Image (cartoon, grey):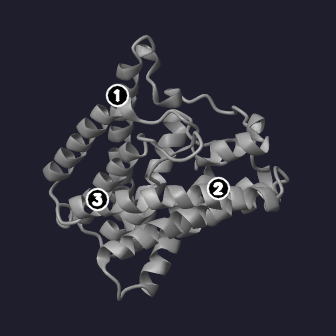
C-alpha cells in the first residue's frame, strides 16, 4: 500500500508528514523513559523481519497481490511505541533506498501504515481482550490493513485523484482480502518470534535477522509479481499513470543494479542491504535519542 508520488496533492503530503512526526517523537521519548538495551535490540530485529517479509507478495484474486504490512506483528511483540518506530524505520529505508513509496508521499505512507496501522490495531486489541490471543492477532491485523486502506482512499479523494465513491469500496474490498492474509501471517510471526525476542541479546537478534534473510532469499523466486492492492485499484480506476518519479533511489525496485543481468542475485543483494540498513536505523535512532536526552 505504498503510495507513490503523483497520487496525492502536496498539501496532503505536508500535513500528513507533520501529523506523523508527533507520534514518532512521542514514541521515541516513551522508549527513552523506559530504555532497556534488550528492548532496542528487539525493535531492530522486528524492523528487519518486517522489511524482509514485505518483499514477499502473495497472490489474491483477479491478478492482484498483497504483502504483509506488519503493524500488528510489531504491536503484539513490541507494544505501541516500539511498533511505531519499527514501522517507521522500515518505511524510511524502503523509500530512501528502494524507491518504494514516494518521497513527497512519505508522510502519507508513514501515517497510514506506521501510525494508523499501529494505533488502529491497538484500539481493536483493547476492545477484544477476552478472546483468544490468535483471534486478537487476526482481528487486529485485519483492522490495521483495512483502516490504512480507508485513510489512503480519503487522501486520494481529497487530492482530487479519484472520487471517494469509486476508490473507497475498491480499496476496502481488495485490502479486506489482503487483511485476512495479514492475519494468518501475523499469527505465525508473533508465535515464532514473541518469546525469542522478549529479552534478546544482540547476538540472538542478529542471528534471528540472518535466518529470516535466508528464509526470504529462498522464497523470493516464488513471490507474486502481480500488482499490489493499491496498484491494482489505480490501474482499474485509471489513475495509475499519475505516478511521478521525483526521486531516483539507489536500488530501485529492490534489485541491485550491479547484478542486473542476474535478477535473483540482484533481488537477494537488495534484501540483504535493506535488512542491514533497517536493523541499523531502528537500533541507532533509539540509542541516539536516548543518549542525547540523558
Whether residues under marks 1 and 3 lie with C-beta atoms below 8 angstroms apart, the answer is no
Whether residues under marks 2 and 3 lie with C-beta atoms below 8 angstroms apart, the answer is no
Residue 289: in sight, yes or no? yes
Q: Mark 2 or mark 1: which comes first in sequence?
A: 2
Secondary structure of the residue carrying tag 3 is: helix
Question: Which-is-in-front pick, marks 2 and 3?
Answer: 3
Tell me the quarter of the picture where residue 266 sits: top left
Residue 253: image tag: none
**Whole-number angstrom distance, CA of label 2 to CA of label 3:** 28 Å
Whether residues under marks 2 and 1 lie with C-beta atoms below 8 angstroms apart, the answer is no
Residue that protrudes farthest toward the front in the picture: 62
Residue drawn 41% across the image and 63% down it: 183
Q: Residues within 10 Å of mark 2 (few under 14, many from 20)?
A: many
Secondary structure of the residue carrying tag 1 is: helix
**120 to the left or right of 191:** right
Residue drawn 25% across the image and 39% down it: 215
Residue 103: in sight, yes or no? no
Q: Mark 1 or mark 3: which comes first in sequence?
A: 3
Residue drawn 51% across the image and 47% down it: 60
Instruction: Please give the residue where the numbered disc 2 appears in the rendered image.
Output: 108
**Whole-number angstrom distance, CA of label 1 to CA of label 3:** 23 Å
**Whole-number angstrom distance, CA of label 2 to CA of label 1:** 28 Å
Instruction: Please give the residue where the numbered disc 1 appears in the rendered image.
Output: 268
Residue that protrudes farthest toward the bottom in the picture: 130
Q: Quadrant of the C terminus?
A: bottom left
Residue drawn 79% across the image and 41% down it: 238
Instruction: Please give the residue where the numbered disc 3 appears in the rendered image.
Output: 188
Amino acid at each position: 500500500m505504498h503510495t507513490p508520488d503523483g497520487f496525492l496533492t502536496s498539501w496532503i503530503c505536508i500535513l500528513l508528514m507533520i501529523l506523523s512526526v508527533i507520534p514518532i517523537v512521542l514514541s521515541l521519548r516513551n522508549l527513552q523513559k523506559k530504555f532497556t538495551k534488550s528492548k532496542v535490540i528487539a525493535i531492530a530485529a522486528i524492523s528487519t523481519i518486517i522489511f524482509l517479509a514485505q518483499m514477499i507478495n502473495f497472490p489474491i484474486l483477479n491478478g492482484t497481490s498483497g504483502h504483509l504490512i506488519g503493524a500488528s506483528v510489531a504491536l503484539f511483540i513490541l507494544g505501541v511505541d516500539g511498533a511505531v518506530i519499527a514501522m517507521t524505520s522500515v518505511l524510511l529505508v524502503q523509500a530512501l533506498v528502494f524507491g518504494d513509496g514516494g518521497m513527497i508521499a512519505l508522510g502519507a505512507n508513514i501515517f497510514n501504515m506506521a501510525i494508523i496501522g499501529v494505533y488502529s490495531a491497538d484500539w481493536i486489541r483493547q476492545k477484544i481482550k477476552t478472546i483468544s490471543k490468535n483471534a486478537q492477532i487476526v482481528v487486529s491485523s485485519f483492522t490495521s490493513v483495512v483502516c490504512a486502506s480507508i485513510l489512503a482512499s480519503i487522501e486520494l479523494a481529497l487530492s482530487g485523484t479519484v472520487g471517494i465513491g469509486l476508490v473507497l469500496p475498491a480499496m476496502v474490498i481488495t485490502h479486506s482480502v489482503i487483511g485476512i492474509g495479514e492475519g494468518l501471517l501475523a499469527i505465525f510471526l508473533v508465535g515464532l518470534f514473541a518469546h525469542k525476542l522478549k529479552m534478546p541479546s544482540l547476538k540472538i537478534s542478529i542471528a534471528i535477522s540472518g535466518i529470516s534473510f535466508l528464509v526470504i532469499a529462498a522464497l523470493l523466486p516464488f513471490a507474486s509479481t502481480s500488482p499490489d492492492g493499491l496498484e491494482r485499484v489505480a490501474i482499474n480506476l485509471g489513475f495509475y499513470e499519475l505516478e511521478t518519479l521525483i526521486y531516483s533511489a539507489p536500488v530501485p525496485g529492490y534489485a541491485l543494479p550491479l547484478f542486473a543481468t542476474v535478477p535473483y542475485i540482484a533481488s537477494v543483494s537488495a534484501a540483504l542491504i535493506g535488512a542491514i540498513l533497517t536493523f541499523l536505523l531502528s537500533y541507532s535512532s533509539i540509542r541516539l535519542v536516548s543518549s542525547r536526552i540523558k
